[in-house]
Image: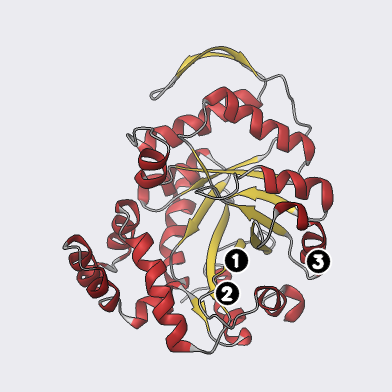
Amino acid sequence: MADMTSPLPRRNGMTVPLPGHLHTHRDKLVELADLGYSDIWSAESDGADAFTPLTLAAAWEPRLRLGTAIVPAYTRSPACFAQSVASLADAAPGRFAIGIGSSSNVIVERWNGVPFVEPYKKVRDVVRFLNDALAGEKIAKSYDTFTVNGFKLGVRPEVKPSILVAALRDGMLRLAGREADGAIINWLSPEDVRKVVGVVRDAAGGAEREIVARIFVCPSENTEVVRNAAKFAIAAYLNVPVYAAFHEWLGRGPQLAGMWDAWKAGDRKAALAAIPDEVVDDLVVHGSPAQCRAQIDRYFANGVTTSSLAILPLDPELDFWNAVKELSPSAN
C-alpha cells in the first residue's frame, strides 16, 4: 500500500503530566527535550487539568511545544475557555495548540453534571467561537448550542494557536479537516490511521492538516502480563458508547461483540476474557523497545504527523523513565 506520510515534519511527543507531583517535573521536562521529544500533550479527565502542566512547562522548557489532547468542549463556559486558551498562547508564543473534543458521557454528564447532548454541534460551535474570539471580534452571536452577547477577548496572543479537533468517526473527522487545523486521534491501530486520515484530508480539500495520535505503549516483552493488563484498559474505554461506535465504524465490531455482550450482561470477567489478543496487539504497542519504535513508525508512515506517547504501566516491572528513554528519538 502507498505510504501516507505527511509533508509536515514529524513531531515526537509525550503525554503529560509525568508521574509525581507537578512541582517536581522541571528537570524531567528538560530531559524530555534533551532526549529529542518535541512536544508534550496534556489530557483532562480526573487528574490534573489540561492547562496547568503546560503552563509550568511553558516557563521551564522553551524547546517543547505544548498541546491539549484534549479539553472537553462542555466543561468550560465560552468566555472562560477563550481566556484560558489565549493566556497560554500568550505565555508560549507559537508553541501552543488547543485540542478540543466532545469527551464522553461519563466525564461530561456523570462527573461534571452537564448534559451530553449534540456533541458534534457543541465541538463545532466551540471551534467557531474560539476562532471568532482569537480574531479580536466583539462577539454578539448565537451559535447552535450557546449564545455569547458582547464578549471581547482582552488578551491578544502574538501567534494564534492551532485549533485541533479530537475526532473518532466521520462527522468529527470532517469537522477537523474543514474548520480546524487538524485532528487528534487515539485508541486505533496503525492500519486504522489510513481510514481516519483519508477522511480528514478529503474534508480539507487538499490542504495540509496536523494529525496527532495518542499512542498507548508498554515496552515490555512480558507478553501475557501486558496483554492481560491491557484488556482492563480496553474494556474501560471501548464500552463507552462513543468508543464502541468508533470501533464498529472501523470494522472491529465482530471481534468486540463478545466483550460488549458480556459487559452489558454485567459479567466483567467474561467481558475481559472475550477480548481477542489480536485486538490488544492492534491497540497497545508492546514488545521490545526496538519492536515498539518500529510499530510507532508505522503510525507515522500511515499519516500521523505528531505522536503523544502514553506509557502504560501494564508490566509491574516496567520502569517509566527508562521506557521514556528507550522510546525516545535519541534511541533510534
Tell me: residue 303, above or below residue 96: below
Tell me: residue 185, above or below residue 283: above
**SS class, disc 3:** helix
Q: Quadrant of residue 19?
A: bottom right
Between 154 and 227, the one nearer to me in the picture: 227
Q: Which residue is mark 3?
A: 31
**SS class, disc 2:** helix
Crowding at dot 1, Cα within 10 Å, few <14 / some 14-19 / many 20+, comes out as many
Tell me: residue 27, above or below residue 331: above
Return the x and y of residue 68 as percentages of the image width and height.
60, 47
Count the labels in the image.
3
Tell me: residue 171, above or below residue 300: above
* Outermost residue to the front: 21
Q: Quadrant of residue 250?
A: bottom left
Return the x and y of residue 175 as percentages of the image width and height.
45, 42
**Label 3–label 2 contact, CB within 8 A:** no
The kind of residue on which mark 3 rests is: Glu
Between 327 and 200, the one nearer to me in the picture: 327
**Label 2–label 1 contact, CB within 8 A:** yes
Q: Which residue is mark 1?
A: 309
Q: Which residue is mark 2?
A: 296
Left or right placement of residue 254 versus residue 124 in this view:
left
Q: Earlier in the sequence, mark 1 or mark 3?
A: 3
Q: CA distance from mark 1 to mark 3?
A: 16 Å
Q: CA distance from mark 2 to mark 1?
A: 9 Å
Q: Quadrant of residue 196?
A: bottom left
